[in-house]
Amino acid sequence: MSQQKQTLGEFIIQNQTSFKYSSGELSSLLNSIRLAAKVVNHEVNKAGLVDIIGAAGDTNVQGEDQQKLDVYANEKFIQTLTKRNIVCGIASEEEDSYITINSQDENHRNKYVVLIDPLDGSSNIDVNVSVGTIFSIYRRITPVGTPVQLEDFLQKGSEQVAAGYVVYGTSTMLVYTTGDGVNGFTLNPAIGSFYLSHPKMEFPENGSIYSVNEGNYVHFPQGIKSYIKYCQEEVDDRPYTARYIGSLVSDFHRNMIKGGIYLYPQSSKNPSGKLRLLYECNPMAFLAEQAKGKASDGFTRIMEISPTELHQRVPFICGSKNMVDKAEEFMRISVERML
Ligand code: P6P
């Protein structure tokens, strides 16, 4: 009889003692994310069968067409997080501003804020390609007992207490960290439980996969162009393999397991890059570093960037440490040649 794998709920409880804050609340918060992930997974998996795919007819603060599942996922995560009476505020890619959540005693006693991309890669929904949810959790820094403030959300990534993603792929997985390594849990849809399937996930130090939208090549800075040509030349362990799904969570997940690098650099089209610092880059950077990988904007550690706006974008290079180091080297050389 194969040993029964640990469930996500059991794992959260077992590991809450290793969490330096009053862990009972964070455990409850993580369990609410677990519940919302199951609810959203149910809809994502049958999107082709019901009238829920396709554009919702609205656009989000990013000016992007909102897919119906975007809206549904956003609503479900906000509802579930609110009910648990743990968070004092939520910021979402789908919401123009942050949402103030008042505690049930109306005294703003809740300590945590959550930032979320409820359905990343949603343009893939209609073509049945994996999508994901990304979340980032902080403790508030303004006084408990007062309404949450913007500064509670504009914290450096290094202040995160937890971060993770759900990937709705060939199987649904929840992967997260509370600062003590990265662990992956696979959903058994037959019984609705997540089981520990990928303990202590780590990026191989080297890899041979590079993930970038090469359709933007002509718009990239010279350092990125040089790095892409480095990946393609026939020398040593190269050429590398190009794999780009167009869904950050899926590309990140594959690269963490196999070894690889994901790049969404700045370009003449996107001068600050496309990905958002607070609810895409910071949580993925926390996971990357906890998995012995690396995440930067090409020059600076992502988790050291001081946020200035809720939806600000940054260039993003993330993955196997030695591959990110090499990409940064090309960026540095390119700048030095311009001086
Ligand atoms: P492009 C999805 O919209 C996303 O934010 C990431 O998940 C993905 O890696 C990237 O944008 C795809 O962007 O411009 O290559 O289509």
Image (cartoon, rainbow, N blue to C red):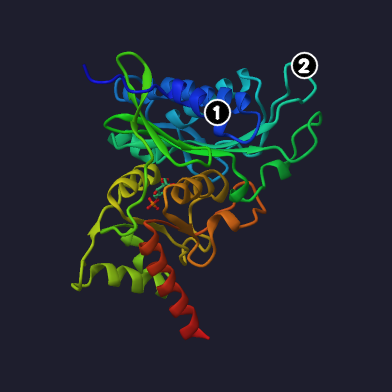
Q: Is mark 2 within 8 Å of ligand 1?
A: no
Residue 46: x percent and y percent?
32, 21
Residue 303: x percent and y percent?
56, 54
Q: CA distance from mark 1 to mark 2?
A: 26 Å
* Quadrant in the picture for residue 218: bottom left
Residue 161: x percent and y percent?
59, 39
Query: Which residue position holds label 1?
Result: 16
**Side of 163 where 222 appears, left or right:** left
Q: Residue 138 versus residue 92: which sits nearer the camera?
A: 138
**Side of 65 where 93 appears, left or right:** right
Q: Secondary structure at mark 1?
A: helix
Q: Residue at x 74, y 34 (%)?
A: 148
**Side of 145 where 185 appears, left or right:** left
Q: Residue 168 versus residue 43: which sits nearer the camera?
A: 168
**On-image quarter of the N terminus:** top left
Q: Residue at x 48, y 65 (%)?
A: 298
Front label number (1 vs 2): 1
Q: Residue at x 46, y 32 (%)?
A: 70
* Quadrant in the picture for residue 193: top left
N-term-proximal mark, 1 vs 2: 1
Q: What's the mark number on residue 105? A: 2
Q: Residue 24 versus residue 247: which sits nearer the camera?
A: 24
Residues at discs 1 and 2 in contact (Cβ within 8 Å): no
Residue 277 visible in the current orientation: yes
Q: Amino acid at mark 2?
A: Asp
